[in-house]
Image: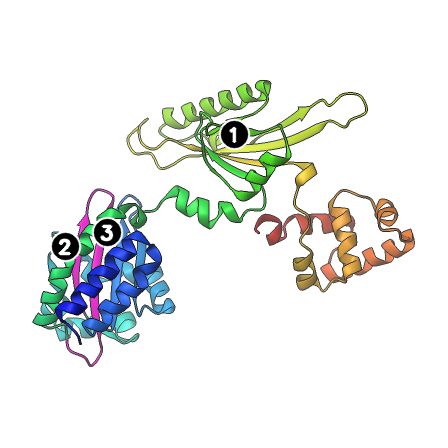
Amino acid sequence: MDLSTERYEEIIHLLYEAVAEPSGWPDFFTSLGQAIEANVIHMLAIDKKHGSLSYSDGFNLPVEGELAYIQRYGSIDPRMALMRQQNPGEWIHCHEVFDDDFVAHDPFYQDFLIPIGRRYVSGCKLVDNANVCVIFSALRAVGENPLGPAEIRFLDKLVPHLTRAVRMQIQNYTFSTKALVGHALVNKLRQPVMLLTTDSNVVLANEAATRLLSSTSLVGVTDGKLHLPIEYQAQFRNECARLEGLARGEIEIPEEVSTYRSMAITTRKGMGQADETLYAFFTLLVPPKVSGAFGLRPLVLLLFYHPESAPPVDAELLSAAFNLTPAEIRVCRSLGEGLSPKEVAVRLGIQYETVRKQLQSIYRKTDTDRQSELMRLMLHLPLNAFA
């Protein structure tokens, strides 16, 4: 244990380093845990709007225990009910509230906390506002003693700084559409995807959409707004405005609000040149209603399919999943581009009979019987959707 002034100043330095660079949080948690000889340091947040645990990080948090707490045991944690009643800056020490008899019969302690080696917790609420409740806690293991007065005094000096650090990054403790949908999902989609307001302000465009913007003049973004050819722009905006009106004007949102609309955006290139077509599919993402027509505005989920820049069938996945040979993969990819078996033979420079035999082998390995079933399988490959 090291509760010296020098160690305290080192921990404060690590804390503000973490505010400047979030990758520094593990160093802060680890140094603090070692200084006060805590078995675990845990900081968690509850997103009040969603009624759910939204953040969890700390020192010596096993992944299995974290998942179990988030998915099952957090909802029956008797400490949380008390913590929510506390004012920011006030401590709860579980050994002063829950005696041995309570612990011996409580499912949270008996089924979860004690089996993973934890026993005593001292917790302090850092922030509690309309959006989020952030809680800091230090735990000691089974067979150890609770935190003593010296360790609590050390933490008491730290709490104002920790509270200030949390407030400086408060947006990181609540669910964020842009963070969750944008970084965890939308950027993994291989299909070009955008999130827009109903008046065409671009909230997010994934990497595939960014590439699409450079490959066609049929869609663009100027000053943060989506731009389509004039006739399609009016059609798109009018439909989005109509759907938002439906979503805000009804107690129960009509089913048509959540269905997909489609547009085939075509440009005529003139004599001797093929027309270019971009397919757009869009639907409204409607947040939970807050109070009638007010609350968060819906977002438009807009997906594109551009035949000239569509991602190919994933060769590595085909090989791994179905043990296809390189020659069979070439046939699958050609079929996925819309070629017939005879056209595949011409493209690959082989005999039609060879393609036919390879196709029979592909059917056998993929447990399909005809070309339409094979195409349906390839359309549903995970890596056709996710990078």
Please say if the residues under marks 3 and 2 sit with CB atoms less than 8 Å apart: no
Q: Which residue is mark 2?
A: 160
Q: How many marks?
A: 3
User: Which residue lies at the image location 81% right of the left edge and 55% below the top edge?
Assistant: 359
Q: Nearer the viewer, residue 11 or 277?
A: 11
Please say if the residues under marks 1 and 3 sit with CB atoms less than 8 Å apart: no
| Residue 221: image tag | 1
Q: Nearer the viewer, residue 289 or 87?
A: 87
Mark 1 surroundings: few (<14), some (14-19) or many (≥20) residues within 10 A: some
Task: Describe residue 71's horizontal placement relative to residue 385 as left or right.
Answer: left
Where's the N terminus, which quadrant?
bottom left
Give the answer, above or below, for where 176 lies relative to 230: below
Task: Describe residue 319's horizontal placement relative to residue 261 as left or right.
Answer: right
The image shows residue 86 at horizontal and vertical percentages of 12, 54
Mark 3: amino acid? Val
Q: Could you tell me how far apart the alpha carbons at marks 2 and 1 are, in whole angstroms?
A: 44 Å
Q: Could you tell me how far apart the alpha carbons at marks 3 and 2 are, in whole angstroms?
A: 10 Å
Which of pointers 3 and 2 lies earlier in the amino acid sequence?
Answer: 2
- Magenta-drawn segment: 121-145
Q: Does residue 125 belong to the magenta stretch?
A: yes
